[in-house]
Image (tube, rainbow, N blue to C red):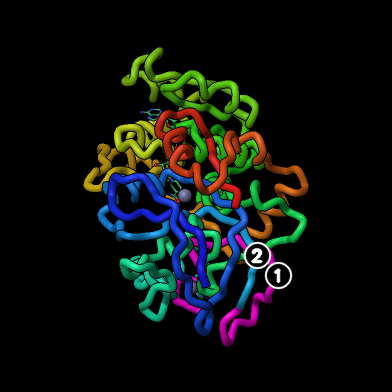
Amino acid sequence: MKTRAAVAWKAGAPLTIETIEIAGPKPGEVLVEVMATGICHTDAYTLSGADPEGIFPAILGHEGAGIVREIGAGVTSLKVGDHVIPLYTPECRQCKTCLSRRSNLCTAIRATQGKGVMPDGTSRFSCDQGTVFHYMGCSTFANFTVLPEIALAKVREDAPFDKICYIGCGVTTGIGAVINTAKVWPGANVAVFGLGGIGLNVIQGARMVGADKIIGIDLNPEKVAMAKKFGMTDFINPNEVGVDKVVQAIVDLTGGGADFSFDATGNVNVMRQALECCHRGWGESIIIGVAEAGREISTRPFQLVTGRVWKGTAFGGARGRTDVPKIVDWYMEGKIEIDSLITHTMGLDDINHGFDLMHEGKSIRSVVIY
Ligand SMILES: NC(=O)c1ccc[n+]([C@@H]2O[C@H](COP(=O)([O-])OP(=O)(O)OC[C@H]3O[C@@H](n4cnc5c(N)ncnc54)[C@H](O)[C@@H]3O)[C@@H](O)[C@H]2O)c1
Ligand SMILES: [Zn+2]
Ligand SMILES: [Zn+2]
């Protein structure tokens, strides 16, 4: 069959809207009609050419929500009509990592996903010019896409696609970093570096678990109002206090250092501040931001010798098929907020505008509605 899609032909070029061929699902696969998709920084990163693992031509997009339209042979956990959120971190429940229960980094389809193809080594997308590759195993910038069964979370049917698509990446990444990776405790003091789409979700996660002080750090004072609404109690602008005084400011505010800190900027110098503002003896710093290729983090080993802990998190440590439906429930029960984070919506034809808004810092999230 055919589908409309925004195709990334090469690095650095805008997406173009095309009608391309999509093959039906093979065994273990599912055809999904994508109803809505968010535009995330990771899409922009790959499109820019800075991602060493970027493959072109490809259909980007990894933050979607949709409906199952066809299932391949052997698919048992989903049926036609089910509402689903695609998972760039699948959950097979059988690989060493899934069985360990120690990490969400399922390895079942990692090798082929990284090459832009389905587990059998081929792509379901093609056009006159040849093969078009999948992206992060999701390719939600196509109206129809194919995913392995293990890369789909089944969610309740009364949840609106144009909001819950954001749970496919940003919401789960931020809230999951707090709950799954850091395990922030009630009464903890938390520092959040970067008040964008990820940082705001870290803040609402910290509020949800009952954190005491939630200190936001950002260069852009326009982020303050929204961050306060989500639970930020204190704000530090490095341009005002001085970049080299940020750590001390956090230590002063918290009476010794943050119990937990999060980097949601992707800047390796900020990551260092985030570690060093942690409380001696136990403070944990969680890296969420994705640094540019080739960048390295550094600190004095003494920082770790004296008990600070450096960690990272992918997809908020969430096991997608298990955790994503719960986060959708939290949204529907009003425990977390999504609506005000979706600052712009558009049709597929205007998807490049969504990228522009992100680069200009004007949007928190843009969502394409099919
Ligand atoms: N680990 C994961 O699973 C995962 C998933 C999605 C996104 N990410 C990454 O998370 C990061 C944040 O994403 P986002 O969508 O929130 O981005 P964003 O651009 O919306 O927000 C970044 C914020 O950081 C602020 N900032 C930039 N440099 C700063 C500095 N030096 N000091 C203080 N603040 C600074 C900006 O003003 C902005 O408000 C990105 O690197 C993204 O690639 C990681
Ligand atoms: Zn993302
Ligand atoms: Zn697995």
What is the chief secondary structure element of the magenta stretch?
A: loop
* Residue 131 appears in view: yes
Residue type for callout 2: Ile
* Residue 286 appears in view: no
Query: Going by the picture, which residue comes out furthest to the bottom?
Result: 74
Q: Which mark is residue 247?
A: none
Secondary structure beneath dot 2 equals: strand
Q: Residue at x 65, y 46 (%)?
A: 163
Q: Position of residue 239 (x, y in %)?
A: 37, 16
- The residues bearing labels 2 and 1 have C-alpha atoms spaced at a distance of 6 Å
Q: Position of residue 205 (x, y in %)?
A: 61, 41
Q: Which residue is mark 1?
A: 81
> Which quarter of the rendered image does ligand 1 occupy?
top left
Q: Residue at x 45, y 29 (%)?
A: 361
Q: Which residue is mark 2?
A: 67
| Front one among 190 and 332 | 332
**Which image quadrant for residue 187?**
top right
Query: Going by the picture, which residue comes out furthest to the left?
Result: 294
Instruction: From the viewer's perspective, tell me whether residue 46 is left or right of residue 350.
Output: left
Residue type for callout 1: Gly
Are there few (<14), some (14-19), or many (20+) residues within 10 Å of tag 2? Answer: many
In the displayed structure, 334 sits above or below 230; it is below
In the displayed structure, 238 sits above or below 209; it is above
Q: Position of residue 325 (x, y in %)?
A: 67, 60
Tell me the magenta residue range: 71-98
Whichever of labels 2 and 1 marks the residue nearer the N terminus, that label is 2
* Marks 2 and 1 close (CB-CB < 8 Å): yes
In the displayed structure, 155 sits above or below 328; it is below
| Front one among 366 and 206 | 366
